[in-house]
Image: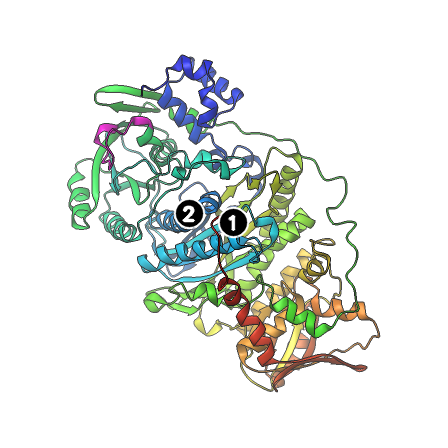
């Protein structure tokens, strides 16, 4: 079938099907001075999509701090890079694959892992770890179990095959994610600090290669699909198909090619495929690029230039080599059994020019495609009242033991080994702390150093108070790095939000990013890479606003690595941080009310900074045996987790005896921030308390480890007493029992 003419595209508004609005199409026509043809309209459709151009969010992203002495590469490249000392750089990035995973969960998740892997080795870094952050609906729903099970299988299937450990992450379950699960993948790699490779197409006349897999028709319009209001209305053909074994070969081939020193620039063909990789590489260099599409290795007959440019077939890279060194690329790719095609050259006229069998099929300015995409200042409107203003306070007359066991049985808190036992978490023997701790720790090969890695985010908090919730997401990620013995350096993020065309959603985005920025500045954790995923809406229902933070820190000496579970009986347990009994934003209140309730939890940024610095200092003085931050579920859950993983009990004596049921509930289940439970030697208690007082950090002794129960009492009597074995049984079985039930593909 013949492609529509430029006039037919205009008259029949075919450009709308290609992702452009009426005003955007008019903008293209005005800037070009003519009607774009079918291929050119497709190029603008994908590069001006929300997924590629960040047209609704860009103005807010500019507020993030992105520099610092530790930053070697900030946003704008395939991944960020930080300096951990000794001439070593750590490259890392997180990206979303939400919409594909909602339609084709196994391949959606697998290709998310493959895509973020390529972003890392594109920088010249050897990947050393994966993490992931997942959000799903209730596991009571059979379709959710189908999605969840296949997403986990897809993550494990790809990561295990490429031989890189999956060392950490998080999984949250809430009905608001039923139709829009979130699948955010993070990868971390190591490279010499002075050998960062950029994604630029520079050097007039330098040859351009496509390497890796052949190009097919899978994933066409994947970028515009991810910017659609309802992904369930889209075709499964927009979801890519991954090949992890080929991905492993491509990684090794590209790293070997980079090692020759003849690579000028290299970029993954991710969203928008050959279109984004070629145009973005030319834009970074301030030049142009010319491609001969009949030279692209394809795996299907009759592929058109439009299909080749928009295909998102996986395991492909675009490489610019030094002219005269082409044979290096051919030899190395042949050695690894991969496809290679010399498909173009770098120019200096600022144009993206496409040829097919001797005919020019597109010619558009690179700057117009990449740099002049529309930036929207969308309407922002705060809600007329707080979203949970009228939710009644929880009933104080509850059995505290049952309440604790109910929280431990909630899938968001319950043990996640059903997930991570499907991952290879220790391949290459560099994992020092794996899944299940506050943060993962991975040894950096060839050094005495390690990196601490964490993923965190709480959409419920951001929903209740976007600015405070955004700041908490950054603070908790950094706090988890500190608790594990690391020094936080920088963050990446995935900003998962609903429909930006709704003013209340843009209010959430504006406020959340402002809170994140404030926390990044205070904690000295600049944003070096990231991703925005909007239109997480189905059937008119938006997800919770969910910024997910991926944090990286350095552990200068592995003696500082600190576990999150009790190590010895007879230790003192100290709570560092504020005394607070408000239940705002807590999972306990949500369970009682059936919806998110109250404000976001108490959070003071200055207090957070002091607490993190204090804990960091204690660990470096070797005064801490174990540390665990207080987060979802509150203090009772944090202490229970330390008991379960440590295999020992804890006897807690609450200092203030009050005949107040609400106080007891709050003391146990408040999710007030900036709090850390420390296990210290009995003989070090006074020193720790004195140092806390000197720094103005609240600290109080909770109790002593030992016995077979978690017991909490005050001068009036026992609040709760539950055996560690019962805690463990409830905590460990929840996910397994849920996933043993039947699943359903029907949404």
Q: Is label 2 in a helix, a strand or a loop? A: helix
Q: Residue at x 17, y 42 (%)?
A: 330
Q: Which residue: 48% across, 43% down?
A: 99
| Figure quadrant of residue 340 | top left
Instruction: Please state the horizontal and vertical placement of residue 512, each as a whole percent of the image.
Output: 63, 45
Question: Would you say 486 lies left or right of 502 here?
Answer: left
Q: Residues within 10 Å of mark 1 (few under 14, many from 20)?
A: many
Q: Is residue 69 inside the magenta stretch?
A: no
What's the magenta bit mostly, secondary-structure-wise?
A: loop
Judge whether 706 appears above or below 475 on screen. Answer: below
- Magenta part of the chain: 293-306
Picture quadrant where residue 368 is located: top left
CA distance for labels 1 and 2: 11 Å
Residue, disc 2 = 108
Question: Vertical placement of 734 versus 226: above or below?
Answer: below
- SS state under label 1: strand
**Residue 31 in view here:** yes
The reply, left or right, for residue 224 in relation to residue 356 is right
As rendered, which of 378 and 5 lies closer to the eye? 5
Is 296 inside the magenta-drawn segment?
yes
Q: Which mark is on residue 182? A: 1
- How many numbered marks are there? 2
Q: Residues within 10 Å of mark 2 (few under 14, many from 20)?
A: many
Q: Is residue 132 left or right of residue 444?
A: right
Which residue lies at the image location 60% right of the left edge and 32% below the top edge? 501
- Does residue 90 appear in the picture of this structure? no
Question: In the image, residue 432 lies at what x, y percent?
Answer: 42, 70
Q: Identify whether 221 is placed above or below 449.
A: above
Residue 312 in percent (x, y) is at 35, 38
Task: Please say if 406 is above or below 32.
Answer: below
Q: Nearer the viewer, residue 282 or 428?
A: 428
Lower sequence index among marks 1 and 2: 2
């Amino acid at each position: 079938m013949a492609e529509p003419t430029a006039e037919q595209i205009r008259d029949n508004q075919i450009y709308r099907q290609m992702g452009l609005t009426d005003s955007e199409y008019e903008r293209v026509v005005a800037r070009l001075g003519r009607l774009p043809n079918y291929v050119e309209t497709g190029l603008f459709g994908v590069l001006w999509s929300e997924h590629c151009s960040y047209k609704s969010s860009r103005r807010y992203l500019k507020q993030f701090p992105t520099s610092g002495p530790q930053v070697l590469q900030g946003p704008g490249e395939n991944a960020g890079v930080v300096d951990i000392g000794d001439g070593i750089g750590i490259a890392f990035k997180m990206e979303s694959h939400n919409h594909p995973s909602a339609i084709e969960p196994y391949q959606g998740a697998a290709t998310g892992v493959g895509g973020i892997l390529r972003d890392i080795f594109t920088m010249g870094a050897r990947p050393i770890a994966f993490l992931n952050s997942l959000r799903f609906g209730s596991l009571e729903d059979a379709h959710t179990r189908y999605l969840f099970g296949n997403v986990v299988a897809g993550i494990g299937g790809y990561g295990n095959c490429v031989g890189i450990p999956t060392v950490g992450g998080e999984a949250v379950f809430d009905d608001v994610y039923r139709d829009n699960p979130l699948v955010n993948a993070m990868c971390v790699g190591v490279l010499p600090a002075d050998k960062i490779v950029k994604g630029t197409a520079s050097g007039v006349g330098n040859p351009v290669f496509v390497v890796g897999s052949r190009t097919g028709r899978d994933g066409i319009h994947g970028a515009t699909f991810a910017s659609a209001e309802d992904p369930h209305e889209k075709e499964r053909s927009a979801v890519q198909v991954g090949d992890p074994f080929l991905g492993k070969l491509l990684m090794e081939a590209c790293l070997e090619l980079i090692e020759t020193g003849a690579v000028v620039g290299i970029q993954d063909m991710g969203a928008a495929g050959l279109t984004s990789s070629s145009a973005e590489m030319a834009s970074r260099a301030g030049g142009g690029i010319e491609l001969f599409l009949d030279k692209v290795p394809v795996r299907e007959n009759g592929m058109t230039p439009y299909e080749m440019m928009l295909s998102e077939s996986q395991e492909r890279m675009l490489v610019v080599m030094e002219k005269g060194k082409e044979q290096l690329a051919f030899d190395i790719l042949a050695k690894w059994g991969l496809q290679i095609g010399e498909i173009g050259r770098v120019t200096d006229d600022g144009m993206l020019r496409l040829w097919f069998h001797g005919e020019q099929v597109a010619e558009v300015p690179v700057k117009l495609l990449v740099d002049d995409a529309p930036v929207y200042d969308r309407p922002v409107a705060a809600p007329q009242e707080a979203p949970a203003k009228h939710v009644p306070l929880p009933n104080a007359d509850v059995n505290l033991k049952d309440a604790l066991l109910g929280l431990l049985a909630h899938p968001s808190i319950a043990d996640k080994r059903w997930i991570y036992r499907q991952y290879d978490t220790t391949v290459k023997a560099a994992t020092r702390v794996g899944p299940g701790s506050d943060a993962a720790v991975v040894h950096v090969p060839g050094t005495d150093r390690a990196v601490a890695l964490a993923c965190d985010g709480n959409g419920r908090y951001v929903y209740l108070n976007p600015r405070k919730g955004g700041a908490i997401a950054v603070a908790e990620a950094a706090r988890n790095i500190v608790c594990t013995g690391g020094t936080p350096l920088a963050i990446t993020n995935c900003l998962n939000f609903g429909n930006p065309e709704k003013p209340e959603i843009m209010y959430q985005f504006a406020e959340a990013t402002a809170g994140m920025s404030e926390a990044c500045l205070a904690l000295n954790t600049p944003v070096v890479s990231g991703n925005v995923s909007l239109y997480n809406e189905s059937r008119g229902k938006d997800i919770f606003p969910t910024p997910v933070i991926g944090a990286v820190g350095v552990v200068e000496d592995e003696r500082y690595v600190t576990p999150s579970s009790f190590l010895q009986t007879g230790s003192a347990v100290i709570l560092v941080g504020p005394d607070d009994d408000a239940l705002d934003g807590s999972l306990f209140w949500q369970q009682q009310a059936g919806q998110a309730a109250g404000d976001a939890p108490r959070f003071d940024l200055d207090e957070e900074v002091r607490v993190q610095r204090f804990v960091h200092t204690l660990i470096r003085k070797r005064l801490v045996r174990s540390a665990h931050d207080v987060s979802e579920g509150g203090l009772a859950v944090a202490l229970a987790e330390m008991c379960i993983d440590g295999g020992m009990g804890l006897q807690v004596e609450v200092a203030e005896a009050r005949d107040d049921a609400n106080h007891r509930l709050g003391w146990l289940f408040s999710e007030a921030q900036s709090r850390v439970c420390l296990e210290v030697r009995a003989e070090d208690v006074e020193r720790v308390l004195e140092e806390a007082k000197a720094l103005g950090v609240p600290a109080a002794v909770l109790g002593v480890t030992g016995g077979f129960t978690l017991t909490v009492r005050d001068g009036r009597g026992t609040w709760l007493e539950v055996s560690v074995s019962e805690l463990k049984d409830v905590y460990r079985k929840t996910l397994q029992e849920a996933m043993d039930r039947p699943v359903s593909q029907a949404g």
